[in-house]
Amino acid sequence: MGISIAGVAPELHPDFVAEVTGIDLRRPPSPDDVAAIEAGMDRFALLVFRNQPIDDDQQVIFARSFGPLEQATGDLAQGAERRLRMELNDISNVNLDGTVMARDDRKRLFGLGNLLWHSDSSFKANPAKYSMLSARVLPARDGNTEFADMRAAYDALPEEERANLHDLVCEHTQIHSRGVLGFTDFTEEERIRFAPVRQRLIRRHPVTGRLSLYLSSHAGAIEGWPVPEARALLRDLTEHATQRAFVYVHRWQPHDLVIWDNRTTMHRARRYDPTEKRDLRRTTLEGDGPTVLQTH
Ligand code: OGA
Ligand code: MN
């Protein structure tokens, strides 16, 4: 049996979210599987795979079939402090010894940045293509992930506004997104590692040619603009882009794997009981170059 890809809630999100069946992610995907998933990602922007009880090796092998993986250089935990290898972003509240992080744990507080709408690795000069998030342990309730369709958000802007935004370039850094929540506790080494990068505000998808708003909590400035005016615009656009009509809420089940295209979507985590364990692991596909090199 081959892969099937069927839209989820097609009346709400006709070309945004789909569920994939007919594949076992514990085995390396065939070239046909990879092509079908890539076509699904281009047609939709988010694919859900249910009941995929994979381990870290299987997740990395599956992800690598789509191209080179990012290294988790944006995580706070590096070296001996890491729980997972560098090909896996640790999206959990779990310590090295398996216990749940203390409420005031520095890595936990940094990780709360995921509660803000963002696109993964927009703080890297070559930002992420796909993210693949595998749910290993979930709290009894809450902790959903919400996704916003940035193509639909772009399309819904008045034409004149689209033209005004077209050539703007923003500065993205994790120092900004964490600062929004009052987290300023960075080391000198982290301030250097997290230096701002430039990103276009409007991106064109390389396959479909569709334009998207490229927003992220990491964006704290627009080149050539006064900072308060830039932040006010970015807030306004984020409010526009995250209206319920453009949002899909993913309610996690154990062993779900969700793939999203960071070039055309934003997402955010939702709060959950901090005394409960939540362990998700992310593999991330490298992008194909800086967005500021886009020509059109
Ligand atoms: C991520 C992320 C949100 C969540 O994995 O990149 O932002 O709900 N996750 O954990
Ligand atoms: Mn994320």
Image: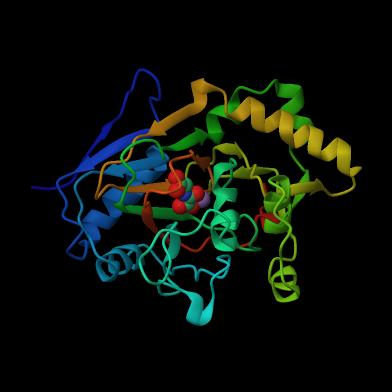
Q: Nearer the viewer, residue 217 or 39?
A: 217
Most extreme residue toward the bottom, as rendered?
80
Residue 185 in picture, x, y percent from top left: 71, 62
Q: Nearer the viewer, residue 118 or 1?
A: 118
Most extreme residue toward the top, as rendered?
11
Residue at 30 percent across and 68 percent down: it is 56
Horizontal arrangement in the rendering, residue 124 relative to residue 138 (left or right) = right
Work out whether 203 lies above or below 11.
below
Work out whether 119 lies above or below 96.
above
Colour scheme employed for the rendering of this structure: rainbow
Residue 154 in picture, x, y percent from top left: 61, 30
Residue 98 in picture, x, y percent from top left: 35, 66
Horizontal arrangement in the rendering, residue 211 relative to residue 136 (left or right) = right
Q: Nearer the viewer, residue 239 or 143?
A: 143
Most extreme residue toward the left, as rendered?
1
Res. 16 visible in picture: no
Residue at 58 percent across and 59 percent down: it is 127
Horizontal arrangement in the rendering, residue 254 relative to residue 68 (left or right) = left
